[in-house]
Amino acid sequence: MAHAAPITTLRDWLDRLAGDGRLALIEPRKSLRFEIAAIASRLDGQQATFFPMPEGHGIPVLSGIVSRREWIAEAMGVPQAELLGRYQQAVGNPVPCREVAEAPVQEVVHRDAIDIGALLPAPVHNEHDGGAYLTAGLLVSANPETGRQNVSINRCHLKGGNRMGVSVSSRDTGTFLNQCEKAGKPLPIAIAIGVDPLTLMASQALVAMDQDELEVAGALRGEAVRVVKCLTNDLRVPADAEIVLEGRILPNVREPEGPFGEFTQYYGPRGDRFVIEIDAITHRRSPIFHTIIGGGTEHILLGAVAREASFLTTMQRTFPNVTNVHLAPGGVGRYHLYVQMKKVHEGSAKNVIFSAFAMHHDVKQVIVVDEDIDLYNPQEVEWAVATRFQADRDLVLVDNCRASRLDPTSRGGVGSKLGMDATKPVNAPPEQFLRIGVPGRNTLDLEAVRSTLAPSAWRETCRD
């Protein structure tokens, strides 16, 4: 079956989703406080949602554009089975961006007396969230020493006027901030909202510090991302984005931010965090505001697919017999990793488990299964554990490891890791683990064997 070319604009993707009923157009004037999130979360994984005139605001709100794995593969132009391979290929073969002088995202410019909450329809998602948030913005920053850009998604808490609180991890942006704070300087940033699905996916790539994720997006799209220089700093942002906020993360300033409903489906706690001041907002003449519902499928998949591709690349360097990996939705796309391998030597599954623990501190549980197990079917994985795992010989437990701080069971970011070898013994007799199978089941044409009589006629078929 032929697949369409990769999607390169958000609006083309919306046309694709709308064309076959995957985009729900909602009645106008829904409330930004909870109502938009309620509707989007009810349709999560079924349809993307488009909200015209939220509370009468002129900018519509969009959510759920990459809330199924098959949609992500479709946007890439590949079958779902090739999703991780395509992502791996793009990470390894980035395409430099193409700078342009004029861009749709700079058609309208706001520079005076900026009030983010008045200009943008930022929703409040969850019951105890600290307020309205930007949740789908690509935060662009640059290494102060090399000038190379980094892209990430950071929750941004609207605090009134041109100020936002921002949660920053210890990775690239956090490193840049530390360098700027030591020099007593702000870190210039830009936040791009409303990008195509592949640029959104590329923002989550686990790459080296000076690898610009927009170049990964170019590889995924099969063409360079068009970028334009910001008006108030030297950062380059996607020219075809819907909205861009330009500003600075202030040095040595911390203010309360949160709580916020996170991917764990618990609240990230309130705390003193960095502060952004916005100097300019630019956007298209008729922009679209994208929001990601905290803890929803779109939120979980964005991080999961990128991590899966990175984990698979890293594992296969040492264990070429590892064939696939999957961060299970039940483990919030971060904590529970399933690994599929062709086991050749006893003990190798445990080596794979230890390598998985080392790849990312978020990984909390690893289950290794054989090639005949469908990683994307949790019932199959559970069946493998039930029939191929014995705790006394196949369990791996490691305590006092670095863990996710958002895991409510961790102790200040320290926790335990659990591994299960649910693979068959290499030298087991073939009949011991022979899976049952009914001949003809998978090729059966059910419609051809159904009776033309109504099901209620079953009694008549019992008569002589």
Image (spheres, grey):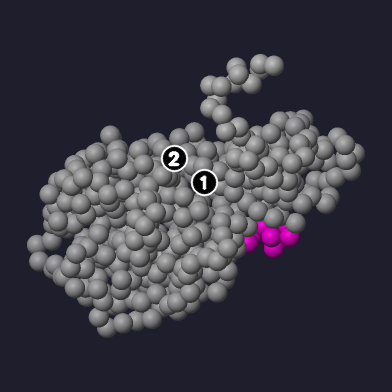
Q: Amino acid at mark 2?
A: Thr
All told, the count of numbered labels is 2
Residue wearing tag 2: 264
- Quickly name the residue at label 1: 334
As helix, strand or loop, the secondary structure at mark 2 comes to loop
Q: Which image quadrant: the N terminus?
A: bottom right
Can see residue 157? no
Badge 1 element: loop
Q: Which residues are magenta?
A: 313-320
**Foreground residue among 170 and 394:** 394
Percent x, y of residue 353: 68, 46
Residue 394 is situated, as x and y percent measured from the top left of the image, at 75, 36
Q: Nearer the viewer, residue 147 or 111?
A: 111
For this view, does 440 lie left or right of residue 358?
A: right
- Please name the residue shown 34% across and 81% down the image: 99
Residue 296 lies, with reference to residue 115, above or below; the image says above
Which percent across, then down, holds residue 157? Answer: 26, 49
Q: Quadrant of residue 382?
A: top right
For image coordinates 19% across by 43% down, the residue present is: 30
